[in-house]
Image (spheres, rainbow, N blue to C red):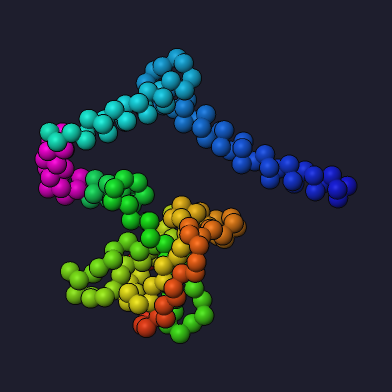
């Protein structure tokens, strides 16, 4: 009986991720097809991808960039719309595009003098405009959650992590269950000694 239960649990672990992935994809396809009223399954999703790609191509031209900049400037003047638009834009830019922010993984000591280490991402390499010279902003994502904390560290207290950002993010979000991210290149990363305690700016 115990062996049968073990086989069942092993099969559940192997099949559940596939089943959930297929279910989510089917639901997304069906929802987009329903919005566009297309009878062919998946046609709506394909059409949406093509339209977004085409819009990105058109937006790359000089004239279109000028028009989008003018529209963006107008949206920035509207109180509530400005908050919604800028928050969505900055969130997307943090993960994709030319202004990605989560592309510099680092290791920090969240508590001065402690032995614990935390993995995060440098989102701002200079805070001179805030009068905090030689400090950086480090975002610490939380496991199994969309929240995180923004901490300010001295530049000397930040140790670069030699790994791909996507692998590091997956390792953090999974709570360390996934395989640790492999190094991007050979050779150890130079370690730096923390010199001051971090200053917490925002929490989850």
Is 166 located above or below residue 162 in the figure?
A: above
Residue most extreme to the front = 186
Q: In this view, does 98 lie above or below 193?
A: above
Left or right placement of residue 77 versus residue 166 in this view = left
Q: In the rendered image, which quarter is residue 20 located in?
A: top right
Percent x, y of residue 86:
23, 49
Residue 84 in sight from this viewpoint: no
Q: Report the side of 49 relative to 130 (left or right).
A: right
Q: From what the image shows, is residue 193 above or below residue 160?
A: below
Q: Which residue lies furthest to the right in this view?
A: 1
Span of residues in magenta: 64-82
Residue 166: image location, x then y, percent: 46, 52
Residue extending farthest to the top is: 39
Q: Residue sitting at 27 percent across and 33 percent down? A: 56
Where's residue 34, x and y in %?
42, 22
- Residue 159 sits in which quadrant? bottom left
Quarter-of-image position of residue 62: top left
Residue 162 among those drawn in magenta: no
Label the magenta part by its dominant secondary structure: helix
Q: Nearer the viewer, residue 181 or 123?
A: 181
Report whether 141 appears left or right of 52: right
In front here: 177 or 142? 177
Whether residue 65 is visible, yes or no, is yes
The residue at 52%/29% (across/down) is: 26
On the image, the x and y values in percent for residue 48 come to 36, 27
The residue under the point 47% across, 27% down is 29
Q: Assign the C terminus to one quadrant of the image.
A: bottom left
Residue at 12% of width from left, 45% of height from top? 73
């Amino acid at each position: 009986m115990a062996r049968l239960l073990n086989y069942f649990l092993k099969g559940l672990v192997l099949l559940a991720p596939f089943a959930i992935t297929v279910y989510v994809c089917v639901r997304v396809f069906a929802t987009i097809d329903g919005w566009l009223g297309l009878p062919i399954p998946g046609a709506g999703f394909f059409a949406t991808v093509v339209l977004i790609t085409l819009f990105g191509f058109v937006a790359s031209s000089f004239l279109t960039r000028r028009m989008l900049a003018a529209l963006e400037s107008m949206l920035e003047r509207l109180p509530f719309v400005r908050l919604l638009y800028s928050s969505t834009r900055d969130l997307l830019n943090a993960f994709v595009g030319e202004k990605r922010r989560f592309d510099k993984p680092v290791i920090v000591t969240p508590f001065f003098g402690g032995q614990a280490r935390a993995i995060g991402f440098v989102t701002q390499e200079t805070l001179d405009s805030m009068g905090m010279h030689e400090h950086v902003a480090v975002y610490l994502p939380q496991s199994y959650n969309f929240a995180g904390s923004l901490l300010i560290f001295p530049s000397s207290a930040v140790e670069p992590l030699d790994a791909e950002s996507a692998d590091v993010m997956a390792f953090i979000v999974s709570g360390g269950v996934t395989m640790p991210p492999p190094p991007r290149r050979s050779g150890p990363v130079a370690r730096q000694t923390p010199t001051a305690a971090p200053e917490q700016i925002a929490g989850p």
